[in-house]
Image (cartoon, helix red, strand yellow):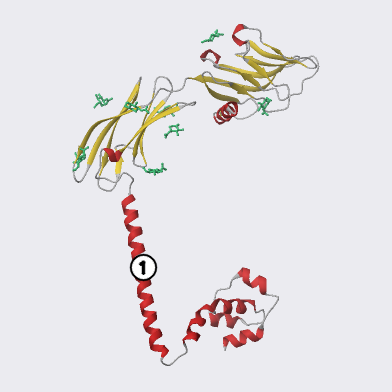
Amino acid sequence: MALTALLVAVGMMYLWETQGSNAVTTVFVQKGKNLHLDVNKPVVLPKGEEFKWTYNNKHNLVRLRSGEEPRKSQEDSYKGRVEFSEQNHSLLLKNVQHNDSGDYTALITGDTNQPLAEYKVIIQDPVSPAQLSVNSVSNSTESCNLTVTCSTEDSLINSTFRCDTQTCNQEGGEQSKNTTSASSLRVYLFNGSIICNHSNQVSWTSNMTKIQHFCPLTAGTPGFTTVVIVIVIFIVFIIVIGILFFLVRQKNQQKRENSENATYQEINPSQTPNQTATEDASGLSPNSTYALVGIPAAPVRSTETVNTPKPESVYAQVT
Ligand SMILES: *[C@@H]1O[C@H](CO)[C@@H](O)[C@H](O)[C@H]1NC(C)=O
Ligand SMILES: *[C@@H]1O[C@H](CO)[C@@H](O)[C@H](O)[C@H]1NC(C)=O
Ligand SMILES: *[C@@H]1O[C@H](CO)[C@@H](O)[C@H](O)[C@H]1NC(C)=O
Ligand SMILES: *[C@@H]1O[C@H](CO)[C@@H](O)[C@H](O)[C@H]1NC(C)=O
Ligand SMILES: *[C@@H]1O[C@H](CO)[C@@H](O)[C@H](O)[C@H]1NC(C)=O
Ligand SMILES: *[C@@H]1O[C@H](CO)[C@@H](O)[C@H](O)[C@H]1NC(C)=O
Ligand SMILES: *[C@@H]1O[C@H](CO)[C@@H](O)[C@H](O)[C@H]1NC(C)=O
Ligand SMILES: *[C@@H]1O[C@H](CO)[C@@H](O)[C@H](O)[C@H]1NC(C)=O
Ligand SMILES: *[C@@H]1O[C@H](CO)[C@@H](O)[C@H](O)[C@H]1NC(C)=O
């Protein structure tokens, strides 16, 4: 499972430098993990020629002749670290160290030198922890200003955040810096938290703090309270409308009960959808029927029932 995770990670780190047949793929691998390189095309090995994986065009990691067993490098620095798949000619170099960084090439040698795949491999250490500290807070009823330091051993960013009662903003937006060890340090505001993130191509660490811990009067998430208030007002509004509607209906009903049959009133609204169905279904009814009734055509319904027109009912309904 760990290997699968690594393979996925390595796969995601592929960066195509150039396009075309001689594309060199850059691969970043974390120190101590395994390097997995594929040929990604079928290998046809003519008799007398040799397939190999080379490192910096000097060291042969694996050599293969047709009809023979593959031969792995006998150099001390590669003993027990090289795996080779005869099926797809992929290379696995275990437990990589910094001095494994360099160019790896799969090629066929013989009458012609035919490169098959070329990789530029960069081994990186996992990044050190990101440190986030709050330097100063100035706090009033209307606003809150906060300065933080996001740092690693060899790099540092100071950043200021300003909040009013609604939102918080980072002065100058997200701040970032490249460190001397080819990693990147970033400090930014996300979801009401200040995040300090130290990352390179193989790993990241982060450290965060909720802005509300220091600026309690302000909403950490922009507009969050506003959204809640709007929703509450909306719900209250709907309830009030519902009550008013109910009261008016009841009043009307009481009035009509003296002269009309209450049962008729109750059935009448629920019949409207049935009317729609029969009117749409009528292939014989003229355009004027649609115009008169004023109901938009429902395409699904009309195709379902267009073969069973009921003209009598339409005329009955329209009149
Ligand atoms: C090639 O074979 C190796 C070992 O069987 C496997 O780990 C790797 O995923 C294969 N690569 C491709 C591209 O199929
Ligand atoms: C690469 O470094 C490792 C440990 O850092 C060492 O054991 C190994 O001998 C080195 N390999 C070469 C080719 O220098
Ligand atoms: C976050 O940064 C603080 C201040 O530098 C540090 O004390 C703490 O250990 C860090 N936390 C993590 C999880 O790295
Ligand atoms: C925060 O900074 C702004 C702009 O510099 C300033 O107007 C405001 O008074 C400051 N707020 C506090 C609480 O210091
Ligand atoms: C960052 O802030 C700290 C504390 O306020 C200060 O000592 C340091 O000089 C500042 N560094 C930079 C690069 O601004
Ligand atoms: C850091 O380096 C990358 C490329 O390595 C570059 O795209 C980016 O602009 C640099 N960022 C800063 C803040 O210098
Ligand atoms: C934002 O923060 C809230 C509470 O602090 C949390 O419940 C929510 O999952 C966070 N959202 C994201 C996208 O991280
Ligand atoms: C830190 O940055 C890395 C690289 O950009 C990213 O993959 C990771 O999700 C970030 N972590 C957090 C907590 O934002
Ligand atoms: C910020 O101000 C509020 C009231 O204005 C106070 O209750 C709170 O303790 C202050 N917080 C800090 C971190 O100074």
Q: Is the residue 96 above or below the residue 197 in the image? A: above
Residue at image location 36% in from the left, 83% down from the top:
251
User: Image quadrant of ligand 9?
Assistant: top left
Horizontal and vertical percent for residue 315?
A: 61, 87
User: Is 239 rendered above or below residue 130?
Assistant: below
Number of disc labels: 1
Residue occupying the far bottom of the picture: 259
User: Residue 244, located in which quarter of the rendered image?
Assistant: bottom left
Q: Is residue 215 left or right of residue 294?
A: left
Quadrant placement of the C terminus: bottom right
| Image-quadrant location for residue 215 | top left
Give the residue number, with chain letter if any, for mark 1: 239
If the image is split into quadrants, where does the N terminus sit? top right
The residue at the point 64 percent across, 18 percent down is: 105
Percent x, y of residue 162: 26, 40
Q: Is residue 4 above or below residue 111?
A: below
Query: Which is more toward the observer, 110 or 292?
Result: 292
Q: State the SS at label 1.
A: helix
Determine the residue located farthest toward the left in the rendered image.
140
Q: Residue at the spot x=33%, y=64% of the render?
A: 236
Depth check, front residue: 225 or 180: 225
Q: Residues within 10 Å of mark 1 (few under 14, many from 20)?
A: few
Residue 311: give x, y in percent of width and height: 66, 84
Kind of residue indicated by mark 1: Ile
